[in-house]
Amino acid sequence: MSDCLFCKIVAGQVPAEIVYESGRALAFRDINPQAPTHVLVIPKEHHADANALAQADDGLADEVLKAAHAVAVQEQVAEGGYRVVFNTGAGAGQTVFHVHAHVLGGRDLTWPPG
Ligand code: AMP
Ligand code: ZN
């Protein structure tokens, strides 16, 4: 999609700090990190949200989850604990409508907090 921010990152038209790439997935640092590790993992192909990703071609959702895992290993948070979040829909706080998994780690993420 020509007006999609994350499609522009995939196309190299908007800069991002890319930390991981596979055939159909890309991971880059969130511009406004909420934890020491805060990486967004996306399918390179445009799907609006997790609902659409779940219905996408065979293996795409799988590849995004595997990329999230690879990022967690690379960022050294896989053993200590990390969170993978898909905000899905405006009511859940989704603001960029190109599906993305937030990979958060490097601090206490026990839930519910406190
Ligand atoms: P969400 O609210 O789940 O849609 O998350 C969107 C995320 O994208 C937010 O955490 C933003 O900080 C992040 N974000 C917005 N623009 C950029 C950008 N150009 N590069 C990296 N992350 C971005
Ligand atoms: Zn897109």
Image (cartoon, helix red, strand yellow):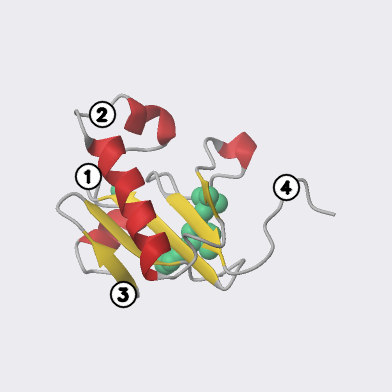
Residue 26 pos. (x, y %) = 27, 58
The residue indicated by pointer 1 is: 45
Crowding at mark 1 (Cα within 10 Å: few <14, some 14-19, many 20+): some
Q: CA distance from mark 2 to mark 1?
A: 10 Å
**Residue at horizontal 77%, vertical 46%?**
112
Image quarter of residue 56? top left
Q: Are marks 4 and 3 in contact (CB under 8 Å)?
A: no
Q: Secondary structure at mark 1?
A: loop
The residue indicated by pointer 2 is: 56
Quarter of the image where the C terminus is located: bottom right
Number of the label disc, if any, that sits on residue 111: 4
Cβ at disc 3 under 8 Å from ligand 1:
yes
Q: Secondary structure at mark 3?
A: loop
**Residue at horizontal 45%, vertical 70%?**
76
Crowding at mark 4 (Cα within 10 Å: few <14, some 14-19, many 20+): few
The residue indicated by pointer 3 is: 15
Crowding at mark 3 (Cα within 10 Å: few <14, some 14-19, many 20+): few
